Amino acid sequence: MNEYVVQGSLAMARGSFLRIEDGADLLLYVWEGELWLTQEREHRDRWLKAGDWFRLDRDGQALVQAMARTVITITSPEPERSARRISLTRAGTGIPVELHASHSRRWWQQLDALPVWPSAAA
């Protein structure tokens, strides 16, 4: 199975937060360290350590907190399927830094929601 790198070798200090918006199907692989992961509308949180991985199974917000110094890679099964936004808030700063933004995610779904205007010829 081929994966496309969305964010490679992301180092997170203990206490840093990663927010992933609408990232269904993204895979988080932990190279070193430990993560706590929670997804919107999911009652079960996950604890990932070095060598573990998890594929986000829903859109919405996913929050990831580094419980130790951690290095992760985020990949996607298709190049055009990435999160709407990924931001990192480093420990002690409180200021999120945008790592990735994709306004074209699921653009065909946005087209379905647009109103249909009658044509001038009708």
Image (cartoon, grey):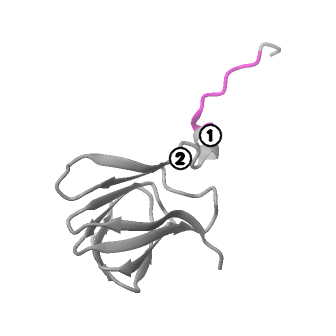
Side of 118 relative to 106 (left or right): right
- Asked if labels 2 and 1 touch by Cβ distance under 8 angstroms, the answer is no
Which residue lies under the disc numbered 2? Answer: 102
Rate crowding at label 2 as few (under 14), some (14 to 19) or many (20 or more) other CA atoms within 10 Å.
Answer: few
Instruction: Name the outermost residue toward the bottom.
Output: 51
Residue at image point 44% right, 58% down? 59
Q: Is residue 96 magenta?
A: no
Kind of residue at disc 1: Asp
Percent x, y of residue 83: 49, 55
Residue at image point 30% right, 79% down? 33
- Element under label 2? loop
The answer, for residue 24, to whether it is visible in the render is yes
Rate crowding at label 1 as few (under 14), some (14 to 19) or many (20 or more) other CA atoms within 10 Å.
Answer: few
Which residue lies under the disc numbered 1? Answer: 112
Quadrant in which residue 92 is drawn: bottom left
Side of 58 relative to 4 (left or right): left
Kind of residue at disc 2: Ser
Q: Earlier in the sequence, mark 1 or mark 2?
A: 2
Distance Cα–Cα, label 1 vs label 2: 19 Å
Residue at image point 22% right, 73% down? 67
Which is more toward the observer, 118 or 24? 24
16 shown above or below 107: below
Quadrant in which residue 48 is drawn: bottom left
Label the magenta part by its dominant secondary structure.
loop
Percent x, y of residue 64: 31, 65
Quadrant holding the C terminus: top right
Residue 33 has which mark?
none
50 shown above or below 41: below
Q: Which residues are magenta?
A: 111-119
